[in-house]
Image (cartoon, rainbow, N blue to C red):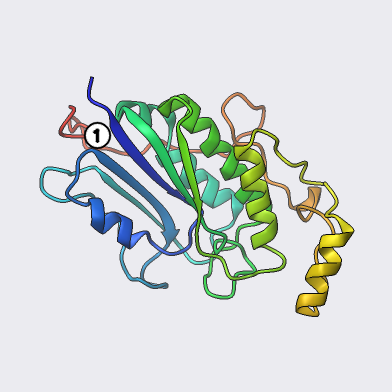
Amino acid sequence: MRRFRCRCRAKVAHHGDGVQAAFYDEPRVLTISLHQHPAALFPGTGLPSETGGPGAQGSAVNVALPTGTTDAGWLRAFHAVVPPPLLRAFRAAILVSQHGCDTHRLDPLAGLQLSIDAQRTAHAAIHVLAHQAAGGRWLLTGGGGYELLQVVPRTWAHLLAEAAGHPIDPGARIPATWREHATRGTDLQAPESMTKGPRHSTPASNPGTTQQIPSTRPSWPPGRPYFPSTG
């Protein structure tokens, strides 16, 4: 059986133009990008019509989200286009994910409106997908993110803890020593807990949980295979 790599780009406000360009004509690599609509944000690429080059149609998936998209809308889009059957059909050998923080509502450069709760929910969902579709082989990276006190440290702490198999309780208190260090370095008040708390938490969205973000299946042309090279 031929093995394929799968590239899933998650939680990044800007389109993954470089990765898409590198693999646009490569049917063995699937790129998926959820990002703010290119009409509103650099680099101006990432329309749904960008689906892969000749011989690799369907190997690029772009979900261009409107400015102002919040937790529920982003997670609904994610679960609609990145379901386990899609990745299993691609026979992925590895799942590679990029976890930018610039989808957060406090990010100064972009216009999406996610919370840390939604970002950590996506971390967990991608971890589950790696086990369901790629035998647990998961390579994760950071990405964009420019709110360096309230967002980046907490989001990436959640990501690394999830990858290590020890998710952090969203209500956990941040150690006072780190808060004091961060406040001294920025002259700003550091956050006290790992999320904003229950009022801002995101409904569970992993398969098998009692609450789920509503989702729809992606609409593919009848009779057209997901990946032409595999049928």
Direction from residue 62 to residue 193 in the image, left or right: right
**Is residue 1 placed above or below 185 in the rendered structure?**
above
Q: Nearer the viewer, residue 30 or 221?
A: 30
Residue under label 1, please give it: 226
Dividing the picture into quadrants, the one containing residue 121 is top right
Dividing the picture into quadrants, the one containing residue 40 is bottom left
Q: Nearer the viewer, residue 7 or 40?
A: 7
Direction from residue 3 to residue 126 in the image, left or right: right
**Is residue 80 placed above or below 147 in the rendered structure?**
above
Numbered disc 1: secondary structure: loop
x then y, percent, for residue 179: 83, 64
Direction from residue 126 to residue 161 in the image, left or right: right
Q: Amino acid at mark 1?
A: Tyr
Quarter of the figure with the C terminus: top left
Determine if residue 50 is in view.
no
**Looking at the image, which residue sits at the far bottom?**
187
Determine if residue 15 is in view.
yes
Quarter of the figure with the N terminus: top left
**In percent of the image, x 59 and y 75: which residue is there?**
108
**Is residue 46 placed above or below 141 in the rendered structure?**
below
**Looking at the image, which residue sits at the far top?**
1
**Is residue 189 placed above or below 8 in the rendered structure?**
below
**In percent of the image, x 58 and y 39: which residue is there?**
213
x then y, percent, for residue 67: 49, 67
**In percent of the image, x 47 and y 25: which residue is there?**
132
**In percent of the image, x 22 and y 25: which residue is there?**
2
**Looking at the image, which residue sits at the far left?**
54
x then y, percent, for residue 149: 71, 68
How crowded pointer 1 is (Cα within 10 Å; few <14, some 14-19, many 20+) is rated as: some
